[in-house]
Image (cartoon, rainbow, N blue to C red):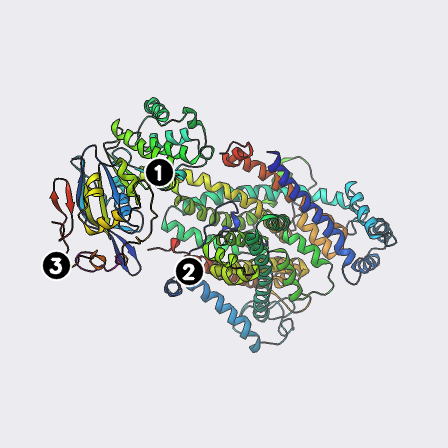
C-alpha cells in the first residue's frame, strides 16, 4: 500500500464480505452524478488543477528553475506566490509541479492498476492453487513498507526521471488493489452469465475482458483513482527526501528545496505552503470525488 | 491454531527473505555498478573510511566469488548482526547507528499509531450517528488523509514552532543538554517530541475516522442490526455491537497501514530533524552512505513484520469467530 | 379479535415516484389464528409483514390503521412502535441464520437485548431454558457463538428468542425458504406448537410456498399486486378457491407437499402490473380469462360466505 489511507472501499477491510456492486443503469447513474455535490465539487477542483497543469506552462518561463527575479520576495502582484532564495518564481514552479504531479499520478496509477487487475482477476477467476500463489505474492508485497523499498530502489539510480519514478511506484503499490479486485471478481465469476461463457468454452482472458471487467467497470475506475492518489503521495515522499527527478521540478521537490535551504528558519512560508496545498487539494478532491462516485454507482448509499 | 499462525509466519518469513534479497540484489545488479562509483566518491570525501568500506564490500560483495557464495555471505554477516560500517558516522558500525535511532522512531510511532487508531475510530463512530457530524468529520478526514505527512509537519513546525514559539521545532532535545535522567532533560525531550507526534497523529487520524465511519454504516445495515431493530432494541445497543464488530476489520486495516505510517514517520522526522530512522535515511542519502540506508531498510521491514504478527495475535484474541474456527469447533 | 388492519397503504419511495407496494388491504386475524400470507414476489406480502413491525428506510406510510387487541398500533411512528415491538408484535426474520450478532455469545446477546427492553434476564432465564429444550436444543447453546451452531439450530434459537415475551402477534417471514424439506416441516410444526402452548396468540406466516403453509395454517390470504385477492380457511383456499388468480395459483401447484419455485407462474400468461402507476380497476384484469368491462372498477373485498373473502366481480 502506498500513502493512500483507509478509504471507502473494501480494500482496507479485506475480511469484510464484499458484495458485488449492483451496476446501476447508465442513465440513472448520470442522473445521480449530476446531482451529487461531492462528485461535482471534487471533479471541478481536479479539472481546474489539470487545466492549470496542462496549459499553464505555455504562458510561463520555459525553465521553472530559472533565476529570474530578486530572491526571497513574498507573494505580490508581480510574483503571485513570491520567489525562492535563489530568485526562482514559485508560481512557475508550482504550475510545472502540478503537471509533474498529474503525470506521476496517472503513470503510477495505471501501472499499479494494470498489475493489480491482472493479478486480481486471474486469482479471483481461476481460484485454486493459482489463487494461492498469487495471494501469497500479494501478501508479501503488501507487508513490505512501500516507501522504504522505493528509497532503496531509487537511491541507486544515478539519473532519475518522472517515468522511472512512476514505474517503480506502480510496481510497489498494487497489492491492495489486487486484493479488492480479486474479491469482486470472485463474486462475479460464480454468476450465471460467467458460468455460461465458461461452459461454452470461451478462453479465460476473454471471459475476464468481456464478461467480468465490464461488470465492475465503476469499481475499477474508483480503484484507479485511489491508486492515482497513492502514487502522487508516494512520489511527493520520494521527492521530499531528495530522490525525486534529477531534472525539472515537482511539488515534492519544491518542499525538499524549501527545507534544504532553510525556508522554515527564514520564515519563507510561501516556499513550502503552495506545493503541499496543491497536493492536498488534488488528492483530497480525488478522494471526495470517489465518495461521490461510490454513491452514484452504489444505490444503497444514495440518500432518498 | 498452528495452521493459522504457521501460514502467517510463512508469509512473513517469505517477505523478510524477499526484502533481504532485494537489498542484496539492487546494488549488485543495478546498471553501471553503483557501488563502485559510490565507493570512489566516498573515498574522496572521507578517505579514512575507504579502507573499511572496501573490506566490508569485499566480504559481502566480493566480486571474485561466485554469485551464490556472495549471497550466502550476505546472509551470514546479516545473522552476525554485521551490516557494515557507516560512512556518515565513520567508524561506527551501522547496527549501532541504527540502534541509537530506533528508540526515537518507536517513541514517535507507537503513541501516534495507537492514539490515532483509537481516537479516529471513536470519531468515525460518532460521524455515523448524524448527518451533521458526518458532513463535518468526512471532509476533514479526507483532507487529513490527502495531506502529505511532511507538509503538515512543515505547517506545524512553522506555525506552532517558529512563529508561535510554543514548541521547539528541531531535534530531540535541547542542544544545551546531555542525555540524563533528570526533570529538565525529560521535559525537553517531551517538548521536542510533541510536534512530530502531533503531525503524525493528525494525518493518520483522518483515515481511521473515515474507515470506521464506513464500516459502521455497513454494520448498521447488517441483518443482526435489522433484527435487533425489529425487536425494538435501543439504538445504543445496536451501535455498541456495530462498533465492536467494525473494530475487527479496522484492526486488519491497521496491519495494512503500518507501512504507510512508518513511511510517514520517516518524512516527519526529516522535517523536525528528529534523530530517528527517517533522519538517518536522509543523512544516508545525502552522504552516499548506502550501507546505512540498507541497514535502515532491513530494520524497518523487520519492525513492520513483527508488528504485523502482534496484530495477528490480537485479532485472534478479540474475534471469537477466528478463535472458534481455529479450534475446529465450527459446524 | 386479535389484529385488525384497515386500508393500510405503504409505498416505496423511488426516483420515478411512489411504488404502491401495499395498497389498502383490510382484514382481521382472530385470536389463535395462524394465517398463511401467500403471493408472488412483488405482491406486497413482505411489505405487509414488515409494515406491521418496522418500516425500513425507503418505505413510506401513506394511510390506514392497524389495531391489536383493541389498541391502535402506530406503524407510522418508529419510536412509538418500540412499545409494541418484541413485547406485543414480534418477528422471525427471513434471515434467521444471520440474525444474531456473530461476536457475542447467544446467551449474553439475549440478556443484553432483554435488559435493553426493560426485562430482567434472570426472571425469564428459566422459561428460556425450558423453551430451548422444547425445540430440541441443549441449554448450553446459550454459551456458544452463533458460528458454532448449524443453520437449523440457529433458526430454532431465533424462534425461541423472538417469542420469549409471548407476543400477541408473530410475523414469520419466509422462515422456511432457506431450509431443506425435513427441517422445513420441523420448523412449521414448531410454529404450531408455539401457538398451541400460547407462546404467541396469532401468527402471520409470509410465504411463497402455499403447499407448506397449508399444513399448518388455519386460514390463507392471497395477495396480488399490492392488494388482497382472497382470504379463506386453508382448506377452502385449496379445495374451493373463488378468485381466478387463486384458482390458477392452486392449479399451478404440482401437488401438495412439493415446493414450487418463486418465479412467474408458468400457467398464467403475462406478468403482474407495475405498481408505479398501476392500472385502474382490478389489477389482475390483464391476465384474467374472465375479465370484462365491470373489472375496470376495483372489486371490493367482500365476505361471500362465512370467513371467505374475495375481491372479484365474478366470484359470486
Q: Nearer the viewer, mark 2 or mark 1?
A: 1
Discs 2 and 3 share one subunit = no
Which sits in the foreground, B74 or A247? B74
Q: Which chain carries label 3?
A: C
Q: Are marks 2 and 1 on the same chain?
A: no
Q: Residue A38 carries which label?
A: 2
Find disc 3 in the rendering and name its residue.
C294
**Labels 1 and 3 positioned on one and the same chain:** no
Q: In this view, does B205 lie above or below A285?
A: above
Q: Nearer the viewer, mark 2 or mark 3?
A: 3
Q: Which of pointers 1 and 3 indicates the residue nearer the eye?
A: 3
Which residues fall within the magenta stretch?
Answer: C272-283
Marks 2 and 1, how far apart at CA? 33 Å
Q: In this view, does A78 lie above or below A152?
A: below
Circle 1 packing at 10 Å, graded few (<14), some (14-19), many (20+), is some
* 10 Å crowding of disc 3: few (<14), some (14-19), many (20+): few
Marks 1 and 3, Cα distance to the nearest angstrom?
A: 47 Å
- Which residue is under mark 1? B228
Circle 2 packing at 10 Å, graded few (<14), some (14-19), many (20+), is many
Instruction: Compare residues B171 and A10 and report the one nearer the observer.
Output: A10
Could you say which quadrant of the image residue A232 lies in?
bottom right
Q: Nearer the viewer, residue A33 or C36?
A: C36
User: Image quadrant of residue A66?
Assistant: bottom right
Residue at the bottom extreme of this rendering: A59
Amino acid at each position: 500500500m502506498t500513502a493512500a489511507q483507509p478509504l471507502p472501499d473494501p480494500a482496507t477491510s479485506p475480511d469484510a464480505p464484499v458484495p458485488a456492486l449492483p451496476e446501476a443503469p447508465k442513465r440513472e447513474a448520470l442522473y445521480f452524478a449530476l446531482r451529487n455535490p461531492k462528485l461535482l465539487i471534487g471533479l471541478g477542483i481536479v479539472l481546474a488543477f489539470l487545466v492549470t497543469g496542462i496549459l499553464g506552462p505555455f504562458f510561463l518561463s520555459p525553465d521553472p528553475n530559472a533565476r529570474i527575479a530578486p530572491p526571497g520576495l513574498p507573494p505580490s502582484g508581480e510574483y503571485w506566490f513570491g520567489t525562492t532564495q535563489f530568485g526562482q518564481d514559485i508560481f512557475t514552479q508550482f504550475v510545472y509541479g502540478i503537471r509533474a504531479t498529474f503525470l506521476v499520478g496517472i503513470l503510477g496509477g495505471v501501472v499499479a492498476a494494470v498489475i493489480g487487475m491482472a493479478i486480481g482477476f486471474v486469482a479471483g477467476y481461476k481460484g485454486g492453487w493459482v489463487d494461492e500463489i498469487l495471494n501469497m505474492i500479494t501478501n508479501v508485497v503488501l507487508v513490505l513498507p512501500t516507501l522504504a523499498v522505493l528509497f532503496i530502489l531509487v537511491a541507486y539510480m544515478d539519473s532519475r526521471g518522472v517515468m522511472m519514478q512512476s514505474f517503480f511506484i506502480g510496481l510497489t503499490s498494487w497489492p491492495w488493489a489486487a486484493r479488492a479486485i480479486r474479491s469482486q471478481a470472485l463474486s462475479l465469476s460464480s454468476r450465471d452469465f460467467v458460468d455460461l461463457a465458461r461452459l461454452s468454452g470461451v478462453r479465460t482472458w476473454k471471459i475476464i475482458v468481456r464478461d467480468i471487467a465490464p461488470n465492475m467497470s465503476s469499481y475499477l475506475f474508483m480503484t484507479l483513482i485511489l491508486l492515482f492518489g497513492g502514487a502522487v503521495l508516494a512520489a511527493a515522499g520520494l521527492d521530499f527526501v531528495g530522490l525525486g527527478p534529477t531534472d525539472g521540478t515537482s511539488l515534492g521537490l519544491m518542499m525538499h528545496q524549501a527545507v534544504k535551504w532553510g525556508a522554515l528558519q527564514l520564515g519563507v512560508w510561501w516556499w513550502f505552503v503552495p506545493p503541499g496545498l496543491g497536493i492536498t487539494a488534488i488528492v483530497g478532491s480525488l478522494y471526495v470525488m470517489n465518495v461521490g462516485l461510490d454513491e452514484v454507482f452504489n444505490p444503497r448509499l444514495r440518500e432518498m | 491454531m498452528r495452521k493459522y499462525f504457521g501460514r502467517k509466519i510463512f508469509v512473513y518469513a517469505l517477505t523478510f527473505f524477499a526484502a533481504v534479497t532485494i537489498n542484496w540484489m539492487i546494488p549488485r545488479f543495478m546498471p553501471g555498478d553503483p557501488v563502485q562509483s559510490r565507493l570512489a566518491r566516498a573515498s574522496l570525501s572521507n578517505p579514512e573510511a575507504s579502507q573499511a568500506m572496501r573490506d566490508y564490500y569485499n566480504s559481502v560483495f566480493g566480486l571474485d566469488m561466485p554469485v551464490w557464495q556472495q549471497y550466502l555471505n550476505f546472509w551470514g554477516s546479516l545473522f552476525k548482526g554485521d551490516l557494515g560500517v557507516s560512512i556518515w558516522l565513520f567508524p561506527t558500525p551501522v547496527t549501532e547507528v541504527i540502534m541509537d535511532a530506533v528508540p526515537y522512531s518507536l517513541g514517535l510511532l507507537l503513541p501516534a499509531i495507537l492514539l490515532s487508531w483509537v481516537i479516529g475510530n471513536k470519531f468515525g463512530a460518532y460521524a455515523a450517528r448524524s448527518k451533521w457530524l458526518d458532513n463535518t468529520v468526512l471532509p476533514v478526514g479526507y483532507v487529513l488523509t490527502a495531506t502529505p505527512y511532511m507538509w503538515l509537519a512543515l505547517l506545524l513546525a512553522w506555525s506552532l514552532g517558529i512563529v508561535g514559539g510554543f514548541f521547539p521545532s528541531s531535534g530531540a532535545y535541547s542542544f544545551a543538554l546531555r542525555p540524563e535522567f533528570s526533570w529538565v532533560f525529560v521535559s525537553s525531550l517531551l517538548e521536542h517530541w510533541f510536534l512530530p507526534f502531533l503531525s503524525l497523529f493528525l494525518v493518520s487520524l483522518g483515515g481511521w475516522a473515515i474507515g470506521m465511519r464506513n464500516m459502521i454504516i455497513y454494520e448498521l445495515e447488517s441483518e443482526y442490526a435489522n433484527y435487533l431493530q425489529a425487536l425494538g432494541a435501543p439504538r445504543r445497543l445496536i451501535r455498541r455491537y456495530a462498533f465492536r464488530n467494525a473494530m475487527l476489520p479496522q484492526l486488519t486495516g491497521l496491519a495494512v497501514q503500518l507501512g504507510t505510517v512508518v513511511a510517514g514517520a520517516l518524512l516527519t522526522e526529516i522535517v523536525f530533524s528528529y534523530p530517528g530512522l527517517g533522519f538517518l535515511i536522509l543523512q544516508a542519502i545525502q552522504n552516499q552512505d548506502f550501507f546505512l540506508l540498507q541497514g535502515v531498510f532491513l530494520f524497518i521491514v523487520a519492525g513492520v513484520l513483527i508488528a504485523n504478527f502482534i496484530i495477528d495475535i490480537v485479532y485472534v484474541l478479540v474475534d471469537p469467530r477466528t478463535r472458534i474456527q481455529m479450534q475446529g469447533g465450527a459446524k | 379479535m386479535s389484529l385488525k388492519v384497515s386500508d393500510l397503504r405503504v409505498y416505496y419511495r423511488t426516483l420515478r415516484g411512489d411504488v404502491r407496494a401495499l395498497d389498502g388491504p383490510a382484514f382481521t386475524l382472530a385470536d389463535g389464528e395462524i394465517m398463511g400470507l401467500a403471493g408472488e414476489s412483488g405482491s406486497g406480502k413482505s411489505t405487509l409483514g414488515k409494515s406491521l413491525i418496522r418500516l425500513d428506510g425507503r418505505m413510506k406510510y401513506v394511510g390506514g390503521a392497524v389495531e391489536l387487541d383493541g389498541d391502535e398500533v402506530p406503524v407510522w411512528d418508529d419510536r412509538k412502535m418500540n412499545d409494541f415491538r418484541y413485547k406485543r408484535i414480534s418477528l422471525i426474520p427471513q434471515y434467521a441464520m444471520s440474525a444474531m450478532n456473530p461476536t457475542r455469545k447467544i446467551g449474553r446477546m439475549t440478556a443484553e437485548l432483554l435488559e435493553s427492553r426493560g426485562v430482567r434476564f434472570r426472571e425469564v432465564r428459566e422459561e428460556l431454558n425450558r423453551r430451548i429444550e422444547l425445540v430440541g436444543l441443549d441449554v448450553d447453546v446459550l454459551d456458544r457463538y452463533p458460528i458454532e451452531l448449524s443453520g437449523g439450530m440457529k433458526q430454532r434459537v431465533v424462534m425461541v428468542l423472538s417469542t420469549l415475551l409471548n407476543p400477541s402477534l408473530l410475523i414469520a417471514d419466509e422462515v422456511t425458504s432457506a431450509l431443506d424439506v425435513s427441517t422445513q416441516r420441523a420448523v412449521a410444526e414448531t410454529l404450531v406448537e408455539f401457538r398451541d402452548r400460547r407462546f404467541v396468540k396469532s401468527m402471520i406466516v409470509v410465504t411463497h410456498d402455499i403447499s407448506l403453509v397449508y399444513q399448518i395454517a388455519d386460514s390463507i390470504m392471497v395477495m396480488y399486486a399490492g392488494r388482497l385477492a382472497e382470504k379463506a380457511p386453508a382448506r377452502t383456499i385449496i379445495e374451493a378457491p373463488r378468485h381466478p388468480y387463486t384458482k390458477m395459483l392452486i392449479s399451478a401447484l404440482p401437488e401438495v407437499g412439493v415446493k414450487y419455485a418463486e418465479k412467474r407462474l408458468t400457467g398464467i400468461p403475462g406478468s403482474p402490473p407495475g405498481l408505479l402507476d398501476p392500472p385502474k380497476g382490478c389489477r389482475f384484469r390483464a391476465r384474467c380469462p374472465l375479465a370484462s368491462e365491470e373489472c375496470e372498477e376495483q372489486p371490493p373485498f367482500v365476505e361471500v360466505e362465512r370467513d371467505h373473502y374475495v375481491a372479484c366481480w365474478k366470484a359470486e
